[in-house]
Amino acid sequence: MTIGTEHEYSINNSNYTALPISDKIIKSICGTIQSDIPFGTITLGKELQKTVLEIIPNRPSSNLFI
């Protein structure tokens, strides 16, 4: 059995107001706006809503208790 995880993070300011800047963050990392970029052992991606970034492991885990 393999287990895959995907973590989604809301982008907020200090007052917890959502900031629609995921495309700007991606562009600042790789130079262009893309939906997914490889980043070491993970993939950094943006959702349809610009207030969320997601982190996806490149491989599923075979153990929940690593």
Image (tube, grey):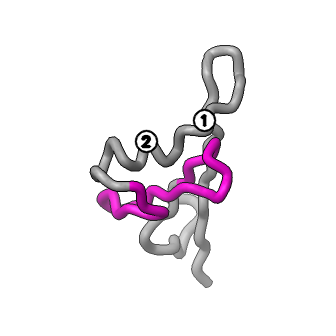
Please name whichever residue, 47 or 61, is drawn nearer the observer in this view of the structure: 47
Q: Secondary structure at mark 2?
A: helix
Residue farthest toward the top in the current orientation of the protein = 15
Q: Tell me whether the residue at label 2 lies in contact with that at label 1, contact meaning CB atoms closer than 8 angstroms.
A: yes
Residue located 52% across and 44% down the image: 22
Residue on which disc 2 sits: 25
Residue on which disc 1 sits: 11
Instruction: Give the x, y percent position of residue 39.
Output: 33, 57
Query: Which residue range is magenta in the image?
Result: 33-54
Instruction: Give the x, y percent position of residue 30.
Output: 29, 52
Residue 50, magenta (yes or no)? yes
Q: Is residue 63 above or below residue 66?
A: below
Residue located 60% across and 61% down the image: 6
Q: Amino acid at mark 1?
A: Ile
Q: CA distance from mark 2 to mark 1?
A: 10 Å
Instruction: Give the x, y percent position of residue 38.
Output: 35, 63
Instruction: Give the x, y percent position of residue 52.
Output: 62, 46
Q: Is residue 39 left or right of residue 45?
A: left
Residue 14, magenta (yes or no)? no
